[in-house]
Image (tube, rainbow, N blue to C red):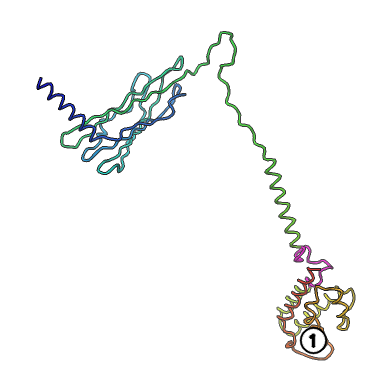
């Protein structure tokens, strides 16, 4: 009786030792249904082993037949840090089933024996969980009436998605962008709108900038002439200094530049008819600024 009690105590101690050295044992797998003949699936077993124990990888099953209809194709073991004082092992077992089911039936994957040892002769074994799944036949179901309602059918083709709405929105956005760019080019007198007769000051601003960049009094005089031609084109005739009040009253957008325009005509009269030389009265940069201001005022008309 005493020996039987001692055996029970030893068995309990062994079980407690195994539970203490191996913890967190769990298994995960794919969906346990819809598995057919020839399918491959992977079962993932995780366990935490307390130090100084280590998993005996040599004791794990080798690839090959597990049952008459189930093969173990491969086994991968990885380890990482687990809970304090333990190593976490992850075992990925890849299986392939060759069971040819005549009807939907339940099949099981046997558990794996997991052995851990401390290197000093102490060894503990645990069993992983078994995994159960449903397998189905590949052949069609025979019907009494001989109909084909249950026969295998081809894969359904994906429904085409119309891109017409997106294409229309893209075309509309592109059209609006081109229209906005055209409006901007027209407003700024960019090519091909730079040669419009209704924007003489825009062309004069480019001509003045080009003439003043050449330097010297000749370039300055050419800039004066270019701006004069713009005034003539805007007025529709030769515009003289005495005609400025009528010109400005007909064009309110130029009124804020009246003083600069009158100064321009006075300087031009002295340069071309008074025999004055030099550009001090109206420097090239001031002349270019006046041309740009007049071109901006012209866009407002």
Residue occupying the far top of the picture? 144
At 56% from the left edge and 17% from the top edge, which residue is drawn?
151
* Left or right position of 61 against 173: left
Give the vertical position of 113 relative to 245 (above or below). above
Where disc 1 sits, the SS reads helix
Q: Residue 31, position in %: x, y?
A: 44, 28
- Answer whether residue 193 is magenta in the image: yes
Which quadrant holds residue 69?
top left
- Answer whether residue 15 is magenta in the image: no
Residue occupying the far bottom of the picture? 275
* Left or right position of 134 against 286: left
Q: Main secondary structure of the magenta part?
A: loop
Which quadrant holds residue 149?
top right
* Left or right position of 199 against 103: right
Image quarter in which the N terminus is found = top left
Q: Residue 276, position in %: x, y?
A: 79, 91
At 28% from the left edge and 30% from the top edge, which residue is drawn?
60
Decide which of 85, 295 is in the foreground and name it: 85
Image quarter in which the C terminus is found = bottom right
Give the vertical position of 223 relative to 37 (above or below). below
Q: Residue 174, position in %: x, y?
A: 70, 51
Decide which of 113, 129 is in the foreground and name it: 129
Dot 1 alpha-carbon crowd within 10 angstroms: few under 14, some 14 to 19, many 20 or more: some
Give the vertical position of 301 relative to 156 (above or below). below
Residue under circle 1? 267
At 53% from the left edge and 14% from the top edge, which residue is drawn?
141
Which span is picked out in magenta? 186-203
């Amino acid at each position: 009786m005493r020996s039987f009690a001692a055996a029970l105590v030893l068995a309990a101690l062994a079980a407690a030792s195994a539970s203490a050295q191996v913890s967190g044992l769990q298994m995960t797998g794919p969906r346990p249904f819809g598995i057919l003949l020839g399918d491959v699936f992977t079962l993932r077993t995780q366990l935490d082993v307390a130090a100084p124990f280590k998993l005996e990888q040599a004791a794990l099953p080798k690839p090959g037949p597990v049952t008459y209809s189930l093969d173990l194709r491969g086994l991968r073991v990885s380890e990482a840090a687990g809970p304090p004082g333990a190593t976490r092992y992850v075992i990925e077992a890849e299986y392939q089933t060759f069971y040819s089911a005549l009807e939907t039936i339940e099949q099981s994957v046997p558990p794996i024996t997991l052995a851990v040892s401390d290197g000093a002769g102490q060894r503990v074994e645990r069993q992983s969980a078994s995994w159960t799944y449903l397998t189905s036949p590949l052949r069609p179901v025979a019907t009494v009436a001989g109909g084909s309602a249950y026969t295998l059918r081809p894969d359904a083709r994906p429904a085409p998605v119309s891109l017409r709405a997106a294409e229309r929105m893209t075309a509309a956005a592109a059209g609006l962008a081109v229209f906005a760019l055209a409006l901007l080019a027209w407003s700024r007198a960019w090519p091909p709108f730079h040669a419009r007769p209704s924007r003489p000051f825009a062309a004069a601003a480019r001509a003045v900038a080009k003439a003043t960049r050449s330097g010297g009094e000749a370039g300055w005089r050419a800039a004066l002439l270019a701006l004069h031609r713009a005034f003539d084109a805007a007025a529709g005739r030769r515009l003289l200094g005495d005609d400025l009040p009528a010109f400005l009253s007909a064009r309110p957008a130029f009124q804020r530049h009246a003083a600069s325009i009158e100064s321009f005509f006075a300087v031009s009269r002295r340069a071309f008819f008074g025999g004055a030389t030099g550009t001090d009265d109206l420097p090239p940069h001031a002349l270019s600024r006046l041309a740009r201001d007049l071109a901006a005022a012209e866009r407002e008309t």
